[in-house]
Image (spheres, rainbow, N blue to C red):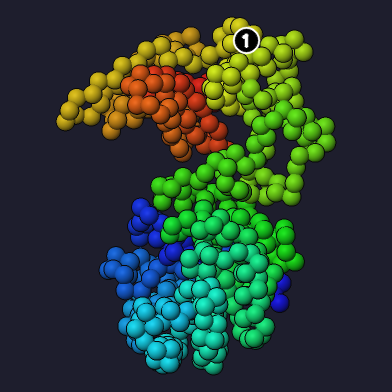
Amino acid sequence: MPKFIEIMDTTLRDGEQTQGVSFNGDEKLAIAMALLSEAKVDRIEIASAKVSEGEFESVKKICNWADKNGFLEKVELLSFVDFNSSVDWAKKANCRAINLLTKGSEKHCRIQLGKKPEEHFEDIKKTIEYAKKNDFIVNAYLEDWSNGMKDSRKYVFDLVKVLVDLKVDRILLPDTLGILSPQETFDFVKEVVEKFPSQWFDFHAHNDYGLATANTLAAVKAGAKGVHVTVNGLGERTGNAPLDEVVAVINDITDFKTRVVESKLSSLGKMVEGFSGKRIAENKPITGANVFTQTAGIHADGDLKGKLYENRLLPERFGRKREYALGKLSGKSSLEMNLQKMGVNLSKEQKALVLKKIVELGDKKEKVTAEDLPFIVADVLETPGSKKIEIKNFTCTSTIGKNPKADLELKAGGKVFNETATGNGGYDAFMKALKKICQKIGLKLPELVDYELRIPPGGKTDAIVEATITWQKNGSTFKTIGVDSDQLVAAIKSTEKMLNLVAK
């Protein structure tokens, strides 16, 4: 058994089969580079052979980069049992490792291919021999392997014997339809490993029952030497086993380790979130926005007194920090933790007033963040001059066929500044006018990394809009929130909060 479990990421091939996801060539290269050189996964699968001319160019670009940087053998391509067609396509793209898609159940062989097992085996033999003559690393998928183990075990073992005799590097065991339980996964993988102890086996999970990570853990414990994942669990239907979850589970719950750099997983997830357009669920393990946020006051109290509500999943491992939510469930300790981060000292009576206001806002279902706390404190304590920068007035004119025009009046340091700008949208025009003023007052704006509007359901045109904007400054990110019935005004209120935070 190896000390390390190999991690093969298939975000660029299986992950791209997510409904509505299509990466362009530059995005594919950026993800490939991040996976191999930053996160340091062991291998990546980047595409299927013969898909399109655009896919060919993407594969070639990635392989050329990998060749120059010593990663070429770690870059794999899904190929087909077609004698020379897929291999020639891969060779032309400068790829040197293929994952041959064979039929892992007799039903697939006879019904989808319309062939007898021995005919399919002969086709596999010809394709593999041709690939090896062209100096390819050859791995082989057993598509629908999980059903094969349930319905046609003899066929599966006959196929594995053929592949072992042909000396493929790895045999890849996919739960193609995500039908296995952890116990079935353990039993099936263990049986295959024990019958062919000298052969390398990978396990490839799908998440149809929400068991992809658990099944991957079971496969590792049963003797699989490699496992397949995707960033953020992307993939067809309900997706694949998520990279971040699998890495944490193997590192913490097995006798094995991975070579993956955990601290890179959050930024990698954000990159793929941006390129794919598929948002990471806030409660997703490891990389979700709320994963390291304690909401209940009793939890904050326990952490304050002795870190009683921490586990092995420390946020620092993943480049994150623990947060303590503010809302109707907040207690004194939640407020204390946030005040300590701010470096603010309040009296017992002042803290009680601030906490009362936070609970009131929570009862109204208003979202309260740590970044809102300075403004709540200023409001409750009626601190004079709490706003160093104030947006006094703003108008935006939109005309069909012309870019919106923004007129901004801003007060800073006791002086009033006015600027005008045009942009691709109202907020873009506002930001361009704001940048002009910030240059005058010597204020460097943080980078806007995410912009999210939340409108309650119901379709009312006067509904309250919540604008949540994520900013980045000096490598750290923070969020500000603005609320108004006008979504542009909500975004501007959120931006005004940011200005007062960075102006300190």
Rendering quarter of residue 111: bottom left
Name above or below for residue 180 compared with residue 476: below
Residue 487 in the image, given as x and y percentages of width and height: 37, 24
Instruction: Please provide percent x and percent y for residue 381.
Output: 64, 8
Q: Measured along the vertical axis of the image, is residue 341 above or below residue 377?
A: below
Seen from the viewer's position, the closer of residues 326 and 23 is 326
- State the count of labels: 1
Q: Quadrant of the C terminus?
A: top right
Q: Quadrant of residue 331?
A: top right
The residue lying furthest to the left in this view is 401
Q: Residue at x 59, y 21 (%)?
A: 362
Residue at figure coordinates x 72%, y 13% from the top left: 352
Which residue of the protein is positioned furthest toward the right in this rendering? 306
Considering depth in this image, is 176 or 445 the residue closer to the camera? 176
Q: Quadrant of residue 103?
A: bottom left
Residue 186 vs 412, above or below: the answer is below
Identity of the residue furthest to the front in this view: 151
Which residue is located at x 68 percent, y 24 percent? 330
Residue located beneath label 1 in the image: 380
Q: Is residue 209 visible?
A: yes
Amino acid on which the number 1 mark rests in the picture: Val
Residue at the image position 72 percent from the left and 15 percent from the top:
351
Q: Position of residue 209 (x, y in %)?
A: 54, 57
Check the image and report above or below for 295 versus 71.
above
109 and 392: which is toward the camera: 109
Residue 100, horizontal then vertical, whole percent: 44, 79
